[in-house]
Each structure stands twice: as structure tokens, then as C-alpha cells.
Amino acid sequence: MALPQPNQTATEERLTSLTMPDAGCTRKARVAALSRVREMGLPGRRDEYWKYTRPDTLVSAEAPPAAVFHNDEPMLFSEFDRLKIVFVDGVFSPDASDELELEGVKIDRLEDICCKDIHWAKELYGVLEARGQKPVKRPLAALNTAFATDGVAIHVTGKPSKPISLIYRHESETSDAILHHIVRVETDAEVTILENGPAASRFNKCMEIDIADGGTLHHIRAQGRDHQRRAATHMFTRMGSEAVYKSFTLTVNGVLTRNEQVVELTGDDAVAHVSGACVGDGDFHHDDTVFITHDAVNCESRQVFKKVLRNGATGVFQGKILVKEGAQKTDGYQISQSLLLDDDSQFLAKPELEIYADDVACSHGSTSGAIDETALFYLRSRGVPTEDATDMLTLAFLAEAVEEIEDEDLADVIVSRLKDWLARRR
């Protein structure tokens, strides 16, 4: 069926503004992705999975300008020994980065992959993104596959001694970055990947993750703190037997953020935990859209998302658990909650379960409300000032999401940043 004329026009205007890089071994995947974009069209407000979030500024031919946010805070995760890979407005910075060498890991730039006819990443580039287009269309991810200009391919074969840190710096008010990362975790290998920084005025990022039997990936991401940035990110994860995937995202500030996670548990006894903590103020719109598919026996998934909103901020959660026929003994848990610190903010939630197996334990819930006045009174009656008491209750509200981070030191850093944000916003 042909696209409606306005959608077709907007899609072609955006495509005309982009140039496909010299593709090498990724060319076939890029051409196929471009075809998917033209067939689907870029998202509009009438699309079911975009009815809570206006995609206009994410699909326009030119990126809306965003002022660079300057602050004196130390870089997040700076106290940890890590392999630093830095991108400035979507371009790899060799001078700011470490040498791409670490025991148990092989790292290549996307640019280097495109110069080769044969590379392990050829078997993954665009593959998981294409799988993730059903049953829900994700055209911004296909656009990324077609036109990504930079990124890294991370091949994990052992257990590296330190995390891999992807650092995104925003220096141009008109930057429009498209990054694509590929991660392959081999059997019994384990790695931690950190991400932080605002990246660009407009940021489109896609990460494809393939975790083999017994492999483990810990992912901790912090987005912010530029006030005017816009971002659309996608993470596509496929998991083998006894694989473990744990992903946590902290989002602070920004005009518009849309984070999508698509997870397939294809091997028995796999475990996937996806969580997020979001704190927003004023002209702030934050959308978490998650789709987890259970397609194996005795697998566990958790979705834990908490949002703190005030001064008219908007939070969105769309989460689905799909249990396919034969995926017996599935344990699926989903919770999305918002704490509204005024009457002007809003939280829009769409939790879903679709189950085709009969021996499962699946649950979902979503709540939205104000600070617990009883708890607030209790703290104030014991001499805690109102602002301090409110901050304490806010941190307690976010705790369930932060506790999904397995490394306690990394969790402590996230909590520290949340405390700083709350203190600044008084």
C-alpha cells in the first residue's frame, strides 16, 4: 500500500538530506535498510507507537539547533579505570580516545569495517535491526542502518579487566549525528559497556547486540545534561541459552528523548533486565518503548522504569512482553511508575502482555502519583526540612530501577548524580 502523500514527502525530504557512506561489506544491509525506510515511511503522529510522542523534530530534514550546555561537573564514570572511546558530534575522536586495545576484546571502527569485504560484523550489521521491524515498524532504526556514518564493532571473546566506555560530546549547535554500534559477546564471555554524554543537537543511535550461549553483557547509560538536545536510540538484543543482558539508562534533561529496546530471548534459561530512571523538568519529553520476546523455555525478563517529572514535563512508557507458543516457564515482570511533583506534569503508559504459552508467570503494572504525604509528614516531624525530605523520598522512589545495576560502585555514581540534580533544582 502506498504511503500517504505527506508522509512520503517528509520521508523523501529527509532521505535527500543524507548521503550513504561508502559501504564495503555493509553495503547490502544499507541498501536493504533504505528500501525498508521508503516502504515504511518515517514515523508520524498517527502511528500507533508514536501517538504519545511527536516525531516531527526527529525526522525533519535539518536538525533543530541546540545550545551546547557547559558545566563544571566531572565527567560521569571518570573515577573508573575504563577504555575510553570518544565521539564528538558523532565523529570518532582518536586524540581524545584510548588505543582500541583490551584483552579479551577486538574493537574496530565502523569506517574500517566498511573498507573491508570480509568482517565478522557483516553477519550482524542491520540483521537484528531488520528482525526488530516485526511486528512493530521502527523506521528511524532502519534509517540509521542505511546512513550511519560512524560507530564501533566490539567483539568480546573473554572477560576484559575494565569496562568499555563510549563517550559522546556535543560541541556544535547544529550537529546531526547518526551512530551505529555492533556488539558480539561470545560463549561464556562477559563485558561491561558504559555510555554517557549528549552526543549532538540531534542524535540517532542504533546498537545491535548478539549474546551467545552463556555470555553476559552489562550496559549502563547516562543521557544528558544538555537542555535542548533531541535523541532517538534503539538497542536490538538477541540472546542465546543462559545468556545474561542487563541494561540501565539514566536520563536527565533534554527536550525530547525516545529510547527503544527490542530484546529476543531465543535460548533456554536466558535472563534480560531492562531498566531506567528518568528525571525531567519543564520542556521535557521522555519516551521509553520496550518490546521483549520470549521464544525459549525458562527465561526471565524484567522491565523496571521510574520517572520523576515536574514543571510540565511529560513521561511515556510503552512496554510489551510477548510469550511465544512453547516458551513455557517464562517469568516476565514489568513495572512503570511516575512521581509527579506538580499538577502540570503527565505520565502516559501503555503496558502490554501477549501470551501463547500456558505455564508462565507474567505480570505488569503502572502507577502515577504525587509524593506520599504521610511519609513526607513523618520525615518533617523528625526535623528533616521539606526540600531534603522530598529529595529523600524521590531517591527512594527511583531506587528499584537503580538497584538493577549489578555493580554497586556504578550504582553509587548514578545515585550521586541524581542527588546533585535534585539539589540544583531546588
Image: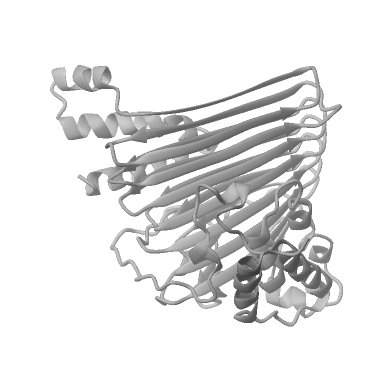
Whether residue 300 can be seen here: yes
Q: Position of residue 30 (x, y in %)?
A: 76, 71
- The residue that appears at 28% across and 30% down in the rendered structure is 392
- The residue that appears at 63% across and 32% down in the rendered structure is 352
Q: Position of residue 72 (x, y in %)?
A: 28, 62
For residue 296, what is the image quadrant? top right
Q: Position of residue 22 (x, y in %)?
A: 74, 82
Please tell me which residue lies in front, 174 or 158.
Answer: 174
Left/right placement of residue 345 relative to residue 29 reads left
Compared with 246, 178 (above or below) is: below
Please tell me which residue lies in front, 58 or 151.
Answer: 58
Left/right placement of residue 38 relative to residue 390 reads right
Compared with 327, 131 (above or below) is: below
Left/right placement of residue 422 relative to residue 274 reads left
For residue 64, what is the image quadrant? bottom left
Name the image colouring.
one colour
For residue 362, what is the image quadrant? top right
Whether residue 101 can be seen here: no
Q: Position of residue 21 (x, y in %)?
A: 70, 80
**Quarter occupied by the C terminus:** top left
